Amino acid sequence: MAAPDPERLRVWREFLTSHAAMYKMLSRALEADHGLLLTWYEILDALHNTEDGSLRFNELAEKVMAHPSSLSRQVDKLEELRYVARERATLDDGRGLLVVLTREGRDVWKRASTTYYRIVRRVFTNSLTETDVVALNRIFGKVLEAD
């Protein structure tokens, strides 16, 4: 199979490099300012963005795009810090596991989100025009549909 044309391949590489640079900036700032790994922030953020601050374990794994065994270790750490708790789901036969955001978890998410959003605004969103936003939504939509 032939490689993509050089211009598309260059854009792909720039996308990967840009993503890695953003990941590095966010990771450093969250760890320095809040003692949080970026993966921990992403878990707290996913829980924060639900109606009741909880998700079934498998739903959380899908939202943060993590392998269940890796997510389990991350949740263990967050549970040690008292940012999340594991609870049995009551809406089914009780075998389902929920990950629930605690009050401490909400507080640390709130503080850390100011750092996170400050960097995202400064490095990414502030430079986007409305045309850029429409184009990126269309592009990322195509990528997600291809999955």
Image (cartoon, rainbow, N blue to C red):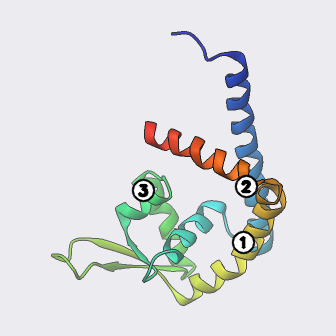
Instruction: Please tell me which residue lies in front, 12 or 83.
Output: 12
Other-residue count near label 2 (Cα within 10 Å), few / some / many at <14 / 14–19 / ≥20? few
Disc 2 marks a residue whose amino acid type is Glu
Q: Which residue is mark 3?
A: 62
Instruction: Please say if the residues under marks 3 and 2 sit with CB atoms less than 8 Å apart.
Output: no
Q: Residue drawn 38% across and 63% down?
A: 59
Other-residue count near label 1 (Cα within 10 Å), few / some / many at <14 / 14–19 / ≥20? some
Instruction: Please tell me which residue lies in front, 135 or 48.
Output: 135
Mark 2 falls on what kind of element? helix
34 in relation to 27, above or below: below
Q: Give the percent coordinates (x, y) of residue 135.
A: 65, 45
Mark 3 to mark 2 CA distance (whole Å)? 29 Å
Q: Residue drawn 46% across and 76% down?
A: 50
Mark 1 to mark 2 CA distance (whole Å)? 35 Å
Mark 1 to mark 3 CA distance (whole Å)? 24 Å
Disc 3 marks a residue whose amino acid type is Glu
Label ID, residue 75? none
Q: Give the percent coordinates (x, y) of residue 54.
A: 42, 77
Instruction: Please tell me which residue lies in front, 101 or 85.
Output: 101
Q: Which residue is mark 2?
A: 130
Q: Residue drawn 60% across and 49% down?
A: 137
Q: Is residue 74 left or right of residue 33?
A: left
Instruction: Please say if the residues under marks 1 and 2 sit with CB atoms less than 8 Å apart.
Output: no
Q: Which residue is mark 1?
A: 35
Mark 1 falls on what kind of element? loop
Disc 1 marks a residue whose amino acid type is Gly
| Dot placed on the residue nearer the N-terminal end, 3 or 2 | 3
